[in-house]
Image (tube, grey):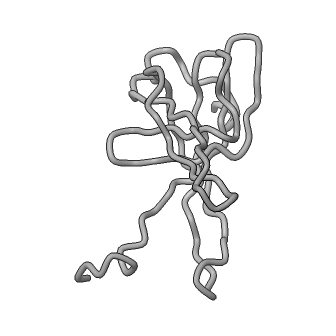
């Protein structure tokens, strides 16, 4: 039986991710606006880990957490995000090994009530 933290085989790394890098610009009022721009395409494996509780709008929400394993590279940090199609993942922690990079991420879930969409 494989250990939960075992490296996924190379064949399992077939999920396409785009590394989204933060760009901050002055907002004209002394603060900054942060947006993300698409960076390099990376291939990796994703596995669910559980859920994290975050306080949003006066209530506790459970956000899905995952582990994404990529080939080791520079530029992946907690300031970045990973995108897989319409899904976005905020990088919370990065573990660097000799050949692998393991990102502990939270899936960013769009708040549909804020934009007035029907349930």
Residue 56, above or below 90: below
Residue 67, above or below 100: below
Q: How many marks?
A: 0
Residue 89, above or below 15: below
Residue 110 coordinates in the image, percent (x, y): 42, 65
Quadrant location, the C terminus: bottom left
Residue 68 coordinates in the image, percent (x, y): 57, 35
Residue at the top extreme, as displayed = 98
- In the depicted view, which residue is nearer to us: 41 or 39? 39
The quadrant holding residue 98 is top right
Quadrant location, the N terminus: top right
The quadrant holding residue 65 is bottom right
Residue 26 coordinates in the image, percent (x, y): 61, 49
Residue 24 coordinates in the image, percent (x, y): 60, 43
- In the depicted view, which residue is nearer to us: 50 or 56? 56
- In the depicted view, which residue is nearer to us: 95 or 6? 95
Which residue is drawn at the image coordinates 55% and 33% (left, top)?
A: 21
The answer to whether 21 appears left or right of 13 in the picture is right
The answer to whether 98 appears left or right of 39 in the picture is right
Which residue is drawn at the image coordinates 50% and 57% (left, top)?
A: 108
Residue at the front extreme, as displayed = 28
Which residue is drawn at the image coordinates 58% and 39% (left, top)?
A: 22
Which residue is drawn at the image coordinates 63% and 88% (left, top)?
A: 58
């Amino acid at each position: 039986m494989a250990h939960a933290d075992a490296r996924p085989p190379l064949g399992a790394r077939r999920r396409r991710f785009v590394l989204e890098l933060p760009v901050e610009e002055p907002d004209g009022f002394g603060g900054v606006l942060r947006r993300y721009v698409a960076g390099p395409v990376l291939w990796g494996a994703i596995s669910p880990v559980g859920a994290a509780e975050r306080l949003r709008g006066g209530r506790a929400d459970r956000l899905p957490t995952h582990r994404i394993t990529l080939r080791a590279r520079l530029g992946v940090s907690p300031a970045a995000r990973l995108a897989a199609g319409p899904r976005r993942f905020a990088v919370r922690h990065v573990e660097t090994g000799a050949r692998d990079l393991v990102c502990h991420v939270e899936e960013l879930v769009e708040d549909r009530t804020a934009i007035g969409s029907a349930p």
